[in-house]
Amino acid sequence: MRLFIAVNFDAKTAGRILAVQERLRAMGRGNFSRPENLHLTLAFLGEVAPEHFDGIQRAMERTAVCPLRLTFDSTGRFPREGGDVWWIGCAGNSALTQLQAELSRQLSAEGFHLERRRFSPHITLARAVRLREKPDSRALLGEPFSTEISTISLMLSERIDGRLTYTEQFSVSASASQTERETPC
Ligand code: 2AM
């Protein structure tokens, strides 16, 4: 099973993200993320055998998940041969960096070795994008926006009837993890 750990968004925040996606859509073509697929990845696990599922759950439960505020203040692209990946970027945030680092540490302790590439928090709006013109990044984003998050989710990624589908398998929230943890929020 192909798994990753992510932050999902409430309907209000998803609406803000979709407004940016709509502006991007008007500028060209691409494979646009479906509204229910919008997320911010903390850890990409890749193909994992089902017997390793418990280890992932333990790592998530040991991770200090505290409520934190995310601010989205940029847009950008990862250049790709077949068309770029366009994203919304998250402003520098030590609480988020700490959460991602601790999750990675706990996953390593369970034997999962994640890619060492630098954490660059973003929400993918579309892949394989070809635009007619270079957009003004500020105009594409509109006003920066913020949201409170307090849950991390283990997500299964699969193709169902040809559609990329993400399904939550397990989650840990700030309130639930308080009692298990050495350091409270
Ligand atoms: P992306 O949106 O920038 O592609 C599920 O694929 C999630 O895991 C996506 O958010 C994806 O980021 C992220 N991810 C991180 N590393 C990945 C990798 N090596 N292959 C595929 N997805 C990866």
Image (cartoon, rainbow, N blue to C red):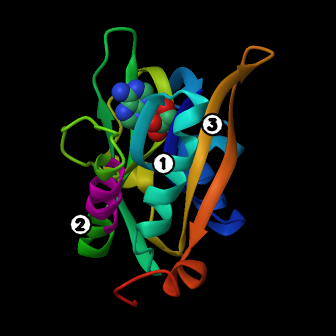
Task: Determine the CA span between mark 1 and mark 2.
Answer: 30 Å
Looking at the image, residue 141 lies above or below residue 182: above
Q: Which residue is outermost to the bottom?
A: 184
Looking at the image, residue 67 lies above or below residue 109: below
39 vs 46, nearest the viewer: 46
The mark closer to the camera, 1 or 2, is 1
Count neighbours of disc 3 (C-alpha within 10 A) and say few if under 14, some if 14 to 19, many if 20 or more: some
Secondary element type, mark 1: helix
x, y percent for residue 130: 43, 18
Secondary element type, mark 3: strand
Q: Which residue is mark 3?
A: 156
- Which mark is drawn over residue 92? 2
Please name the amino acid that badge 3 sits on. Answer: Leu
Task: Determine the CA span between mark 2 and mark 3.
Answer: 27 Å
Magenta highlight range: 99-107
Q: Which residue is mark 1?
A: 55
Count neighbours of disc 2 (C-alpha within 10 A) and say few if under 14, some if 14 to 19, many if 20 or more: some
